[in-house]
Image (spheres, rainbow, N blue to C red):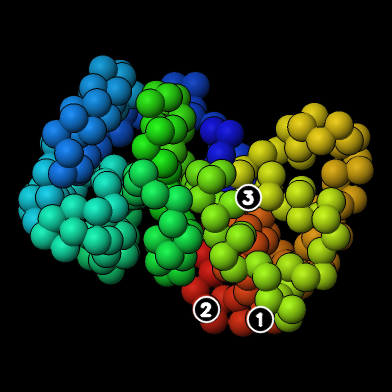
Amino acid sequence: MGDRFSPSAAGDGPVDVPVEPDVLRVVIADDSYLVREAIGHLLETDPRVDLVAHCKDGTELAEVVDAELPDVVVTDIRMPPGGDDEGIVFANRLRETHPEIGVVVISQYADPRYGLALLNGGSDGRAYLLKDRVRDREHLIAAVYAVSEGGSVVDAKVVEALIEARSGGEHSLLAELTRRELEILAHMAQGKSNQAIASELYLSKRAVEKHINAIFMKLGLAHAEDVSRRVKAALIYLGGAAASPESHDAQGWSRA
């Protein structure tokens, strides 16, 4: 998808929905009947999805997930009984109770607090989309498949909000990046491939690759052997982290 924040384990590029994907069992939750029905319609009319249940609040969602064990949960952030961040609390709780279940959190708010709360425990198997984007079926389906495979997706507007809220510190690693490098990192955080970034910014692919290598060097990721450098770079971008590379894993960085 265009706003994919991180791929799954296959490598440094975005992961597409498979050509012949497995049918995923999905549960949705939203306290708004209209939103619940609209998202439900998008999913249940798609042959790639088996929509298991619609839930109206966090309590019902917890019961259904325990009973049905779906592949993915698509949930609103604000729902009863908490009424504030129930969807994120539930997503974080699933890391302990059902770590294999992916979660797509949807909201009308591009609130950096919610993004950080969702990703601070690890980015794997989590997505944060804005409701005005999920009207695009393929956008939503791509996020569902990404989290089912351990990937991560963050809407571009949420990325922007997180950057604005967290990247201003003088000691941030991000302060080392040039304006062009920050621009390229923003596109990386949206999950775009090197070629897509090159086309967007009217640069050569080779120029983009040089900038990305410089970004990894400045963020202390140049010698990382795992394939999640883009995940880590994007999380630094989102969180304005000022820690050393060794402390990233200690803080709960996911290994895609």
Query: Where is the N terminus found, in terms of image quarters?
Result: top right
Q: Position of residue 90 (x, y in %)?
A: 24, 60
Residue hosting label 3: 189
Q: In what element is the residue under mark 3?
A: helix
Any part of residue 64 in sight: yes
Task: Name the mark on residue 243.
Answer: 1
- Which three-letter amino acid code belongs to the residue tagged 2? Gln
* Frontmost residue, 192 versus 225: 192
* Frontmost residue, 113 versus 184: 113
In the image, 2: left or right of 25? right
> Quadrant location of residue 165?
bottom right
Sequence-wise first label, 3 or 2: 3
Q: Position of residue 204 (x, y in %)?
A: 90, 35
Sequence-wise first label, 1 or 3: 3
In the image, 139: left or right of 98? right
Q: Nearer the viewer's eye, disc 1 or disc 2?
A: 1
* Residue 4 drawn above or below residue 113: above
